[in-house]
Image (spheres, helix red, strand yellow):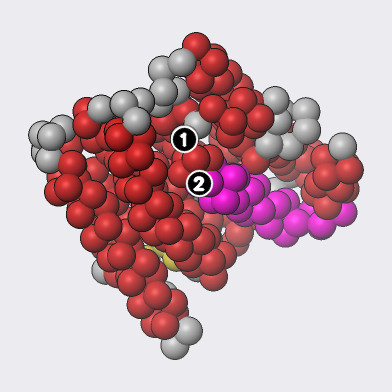
Amino acid sequence: MLLAYLIATPFLAALFILSLKPGETRLIERTVRIAALIGAALCVNILMTFESGAIFVVGSYLALDALSLLLSLIISGVGCTVAFYAIGYLRQEVKKGIVGPRRVKQFFVLFELFLFAMLVAANAANPVLMWIAIEATTLSTAFLISFYNKPTATEAAWKYLIINSLGLLIGFLGTLLFLALPQEVVEGGIMTWADLRAAAPAFHPVVVKVAFLFVLVGYGTKVGLVPMHTWLPDAHGKAPSPISALLSGVLLNVALVSVLRFKGLTDLSIGSEFSSMLLLYFGLA
C-alpha cells in the first residue's frame, strides 16, 4: 500500500489545489509543502522496507523494483526540494507583478500532476502504462514551459510538444512490437515487464532489433539524444527555474529508465552487443 500512497499523494494534492480559490495562496503553498514532505517520507519508508526484502505490487499495473525505487527516490527528493523552492520563487514573481494568484494556482496543479505522471511511469508494471504516463508528462510540462505566455516561451512549448509527441509515437510502435513478440497470451491480457522478461529468450531476433531501434529513437527523443535533442535548449531556457530543474534532473532520467528496461529485454533475447553499440553510437554523437 505504501507504493499506492506514494503515487496518489501528488494526484490528491493537485485535486485539492484545484478545488481552492486562486486567492487562497497560503493554503495552496501549505498543501504543496505537506505533499512534498509526505512523498519524501513515504519514499524513505519504502526504501527501509525494501531493504528487508519486501516486494511492492499494486494489482497488474504498478510494481516497484530496485530500478524504480532508485528513480522514485530521485523524483521525490528533487520534487520535494523544488516544491519548497518554487513557493519562494513564485512569491517573488507575484511581488514583481509578473504573474497573479490564478497563475500560481495553475502552476502548482500542473506541478503536482507532473510529479504524479513521473511516479506512475517509474513504477508502471507494464510498458503501455509507462508510455501513457510519459506522454502525460509531455502534456503537463508543455503548459509549464509556456507559463509566462511570452511568444518565445509559447514557441518553445510547441516545439517541445510536437517533437516529443512524434518521438513517443515512434516509441509506442516499438513498444507494440515488443508486446506482439510473446507467443503465449498471459492471463488477463495484461503483459507485464516480468512476463516479457520470461518470454524474451524466444523472441524473433530481427523483430527485436527493429523494435529496440524504434524504442531508442522514440524514448531517446525524451532523453534528449542527438539528433532528437533540439527541443532541449528552448524548453529549459524558457521554462520557470523550478520546472527546468525537474526537466533536467528527473524527467530525462524517467525516459532513460524506460530505454534501459527495453534494453534488458533486448539483451535477454539477442545478447547485449546490439543494444550497447547503438547506445555507444548515440552517446558519441
Q: Which quarter of the image is occupied by the C terminus?
A: top right
Q: Where in the figure is residue 200, as x and y percent of width and height?
A: 66, 55
| Label at residue 228 | none
Q: Circle 2 is placed at which residue position?
A: 246
Give the amino acid type for the residue marked by disc 2 in the picture: Leu
Q: Quadrant of residue 76?
A: bottom left
Q: Residue 114, position in %: x, y?
A: 39, 42
**For the magenta stretch, what is the residue range?**
245-273
Q: Magenta includes 113? A: no
Say which residue appears at 50% left-offset and 31% top-offset.
Answer: 239
Instruction: Please tell me which residue lies in front, 80 or 23.
Output: 23
Residue farthest to the front, as pictured: 96
- As drawn, the residue found furthest toward the top would be 151
| CA–CA distance in space, label 2 to label 1 | 10 Å
* Residue named by callout 1: 240
Tell me, yes or no, if residue 191 can be seen here: no
Residue type at mark 1: give it: Pro
Between 56 and 285, the one lying in front of the other is: 285
Q: Position of residue 227 (x, y in %)?
A: 78, 28
Labels 2, 1: front one = 1
Which one is nearer the viewer's eye here, 268 or 242? 242
Residue 128 drawn above or below residue 38 = above
Rendered image quadrant of residue 21: top left
Which secondary structure dominates the residues rendered in magenta? helix
- Mark 1 lies on a secondary structure that is loop
Quadrant showing the N terminus: bottom left
